[in-house]
Image (cartoon, rainbow, N blue to C red):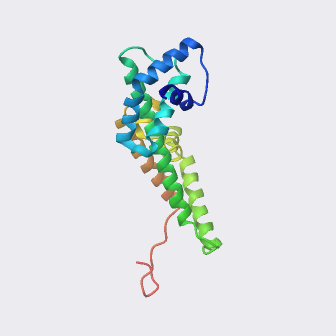
Amino acid sequence: MKEATAVSAVGGLSLASNGEAVFRSLYDRHCEAIHSYFVRRTGSVSAQDLTAEVFLVAWRRIDDVPRGEDTLLWLYGVAANVAAHQRRSRARNARLEARLRSVPMNGADGPEPQVVRRAEYDSVLAAARRLRPADQEILRLAAWEELPHDQISRLLGCSVAAVDQRLHRAKKRLAKEYRKTHVPERPQTEGGGRR
């Protein structure tokens, strides 16, 4: 049963007989541990699919899988990446659903608010283009690519604390650039004069 599951878990791909034997042994020894890893973190509903993803990576990278006691640690590392990817996907889906729910149905929102939102969006982009390239890049990685700070730090070759600080400063510079061209109107008092 386990052998059939192992082959189906990786989509029926085939390896040379030696690689297949190594994979089957790896799967038999560690499948239960990886499945339990996901059950504890995600519940039983998605644990089987996530376990299959881990072993698909192991199947494809069988020559990279360390042997001996490091095998399970390597599989846990892959499992952590698979779980992180699932969390990011769910978060993106939740944000998309929230955006879709905020879009008015049947034309309830006329063109004026859409034009205003587009103008504000264009103003922010124009302000971002006036920033230093390093500030632009860190803002893009955080906002557009939606990368967590630890991944940005690895990508940029700096500490997470440095990413936090650089991103904070880049946001402040962006706000300053935005205010240079977009000064909000002051509210008027009841008499029609400005406060």
Front one among 189 and 111: 111
Q: Residue 94 vs residue 163: left or right?
A: right
Image location of residue 67, percent across then percent down? 42, 14
* Number of marks drawn: 0
Q: Which quadrant would residue 193 be assigned to in this image?
A: bottom left
Q: Eyeballing the image, is 35 above or below 124?
A: above
- Is residue 41 visible in the rendered image? The answer is yes
Quadrant of the snapshot with the C terminus: bottom left
Q: Residue at x 48, y 59 (%)?
A: 179
Q: Which quadrant would residue 188 be assigned to in this image?
A: bottom left
Image location of residue 21, percent across then percent down? 51, 15
Image location of residue 95, percent across then percent down? 50, 55
Image location of residue 48, percent across then percent down? 46, 38
Front one among 162 and 62: 62
Q: Eyeballing the image, is 4 above or below 100?
A: above
Q: Eyeballing the image, is 118 above or below 57?
A: below
- Is residue 153 visible in the rendered image? The answer is no
Q: Residue at x 60, y 73 (%)?
A: 109
For this orientation, the residue located farthest to the bottom is 191
Front one among 42 and 102: 42
For this orientation, the residue located farthest to the front is 1
Front one among 175 and 22: 22
Q: Residue 130 vs residue 31: left or right?
A: right
